[in-house]
Image (cartoon, grey):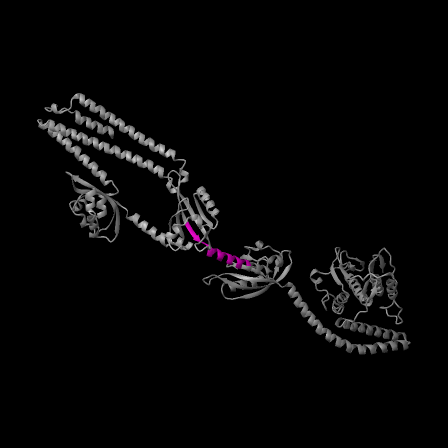
Amino acid sequence: MTASSSSTSEDATSRPVPGGSAALPSPSTSSVLAGYKQREHELWRLSMLLVVMLAVALGAAFWERLKFLESELRLLPVGVVVVILVVVALVAKKKYEVDRLRAAVQLLQTAHAGATSDVNSAETGARLLEIVSRSQQGYRALIDSFDDAVLALSLDGEILAANRRLSEILGHAFPKLIGHRLQEFVDEPVAADVAGGLERFLEHRDWSGVIRFRLKDSARVQFFDCVLHAIVRDGQVTGASVLARDITHQRESEARFAELFETLQEGIYFTTPDGRFLEANPALVNMLGYPSKEALLKVNVNELYANRADRTTLVDEVERRCHLRNREITLRRLDGSIILCHDNCSVVRDASGKTLRYQGTLVDITGRREMETNLHREQEFARRLIESFPDVIVVFDDQGHFTYVSPRVREVMGYAPEDLMGSGLGDRSASEDRPAVLKLYQGLITGQKASGSVQYRARHKDGTWRLIRGSACPIKDSSGRITGVVASVRDVTEIDRLEHQVMQTEKLAAMGQMIAGVAHELNNPLTAILAVSDLLRERSAEPGEKRQLELMHQQARRAADIVADLLAFSRPPAPQRARIRLGDVVRRALNLHEYSLRRNSVFVDLLPEAGIPDVVGDSNQLIQVFLNLIINAEQAIRESRDQGTIRIRMGCTPGTPARVFISFQDDGPGIAADILLKIFDPFFTTKRPGRGTGLGLSICMAIVREHGGDIEVQAAPGGGTVFMVFLPPAPVLDPAALKQSAALQEPAPSSSGDAATTPVTVATTTKPSRVN
């Protein structure tokens, strides 16, 4: 662009004009001017190069400091370089236009000097008009390219010139603007304001400021930042050139920001690095308890911190990170009370990286923190309450999946709470009970039921089944919509067993009263029958009749024994306690049943253990217990084989307190696992009708527990069943008392010849003995 303007000037100044050589510069002068112009062009190019290099050096010098700037300010150096380049281009364009005007002046001088030549004057005039026209078009294009409004006004407000931007603002074309007064397009109050400052403008010949006006055909108020310069002719001000920038959007944004600044509930502050307040909104003033903003602005920020070291720590951190989010700080109000705040702040730096100010917002969270503390206290109370609650608390969503399980489930079902989270309702319940559980859930989740309960069986983690009773009700949200179900679950296995046991006990108590009455009624005729049959048996001499009387006497005795058992079950007699040896009691029981064992090929493997402590008890009752266990073992063997073995062992359990035990093991078919828990129930029997009453083991358990012991039963490893009788050992006696106890235990011979009291000798060795 510079080269083309240069050539045009040279052509205009060096063209020969006939008849006008006296007015033209001499050849030497022309060459000097050409040299000056050449050097001027070189100087312009050098200046442009220096400006570009300065811009590049400025960007490089501040490149390291860009990281300290806000993200939106990091492009500022690039913007500065771009502005410099735009200025360079504008200056170059202006120089080009100046060169063209200079060429036009030289042409005018040439035309005046060569007025004698009409032809050359016409050519020169045409060229001059062309250059002036092109120059005017360039200026017009330049002015129209401005984003700001440009116009020239006379002193009475007539528009002398305007650019395209002013035409767009006023909404009229150029012909309707030029020659018309500005008051025709705007409201009178604005025109009056301009007229009011006319005297000052005429005095100073320039003015700048913000003008507010409203177009006559619009209700919107607009703001323009204007710069006015006087147009002077012959020393007199004849008008004004105006450059007006539309700042309406900026003013509206500032107004919105000011309104937001004043109405925000969060406290907003601007402070200097040394802690001096630059600005604060009313919310911050109220938050800190000051009567006015002016009173707060006089306070240093450091004085507001409950601990001034916190201010130093916060400043160091914001300088390092440029911004902080939700930093909790403790401030002191004017009245001395303490408040907790969330501080969101950032640092603002200049182009060199120097800190200008800190700005941010404060949110008072004192009330929220108190609410959180109270809520945490209530939640902790609820959690402790649920943990101490004897039931398991569970919550299901609207799809029937666990969303909460209380820790109590570990004790009830053996699972950890996380093991059940997400699993479905009824996954661990018995298949036959699952429909009832799901039916209750559906009734609650659909709103058909307000509450409900169900009892079902569920599998424990160890594989056993537990009886569970659950009570549930729906959960609703704030709108009343059902979102889930909450339930309390309790293991009632033991309670159910105890309830059945109580029912059975009540039944047995009633039955015992009835049996006692019946037994008393039967004892009288049985006593008479036994006495008469015994008398007739002694007097009878005929063998056949004697056998029949013997049979009648045996059956009457058997009936009397049954009645005695019923009486013992319904109202056990007070035992005659004494110090006894269990080995002797076991041998007496074996002697009583020796004939039956031998006849049925059942061998007894008895292995007594030396040093077994004595026990305190009734020997007759214990013989009844042991005899009952031996008879049950014999019958179990006879049902499965022709012969078998009963193993009897005695000893002491380790530990404290020690207990004496006697075990009876048979090699029969054994007892099913589901029957083992019922065999001690009264009237429960697995024998065929007529073979047993179901009272034997119940009476044995009652007798052993009267002696402070217990009976346990389990399946034998190789088949069969093992009954173990546990009894507490007798206190240790001195030698004299021990001899007296041994003398008291010697059985006296019976004159009646009853088998239950007849002593039978059984050899006692350290090796197993067989009774066959």
User: In the picture, residue 348 is in which quadrant?
Assistant: top left
Asked if the stretch drawn in magenta spans residue 376, the answer is yes
Residue 5: horizontal and vertical position, in percent?
A: 22, 29
Task: Tell whether 409 sits left or right of 623.
Answer: left
Between 491 and 431, the one lying in front of the other is 491
Asked if the stretch drawn in magenta spans residue 571, the answer is no
Q: Which residue is at 16% across, 28% downward? A: 106
Residue 2: horizontal and vertical position, in percent?
A: 24, 29
Residue 320: horizontal and vertical position, in percent?
A: 45, 41
Look at the magenta stretch and give its main secondary structure.
helix
Between 695 and 292, the one lying in front of the other is 292
Between 280 and 94, the one lying in front of the other is 280
- The relative height of residue 138 versus residue 472 in the rendered view (above or below) is above
In the rendered image, the quadrant that contains the C terminus is bottom right
Between 749 and 551, the one lying in front of the other is 749
Does the rendering let one see residue 162? no
- The relative height of residue 91 versus residue 582 in the rendered view (above or below) is above
Task: Tell whether 396 sits left or right of 748.
Answer: left
Q: Residue furthest right?
A: 541
Does the rendering let one see residue 298? yes
Q: Which residue is at 50% across, 66% downward? A: 448
User: In the picture, residue 6 is in which quadrant?
Assistant: top left
Instruction: Tell me where the magenta segment starts and ends, as one range.
Output: 361-380
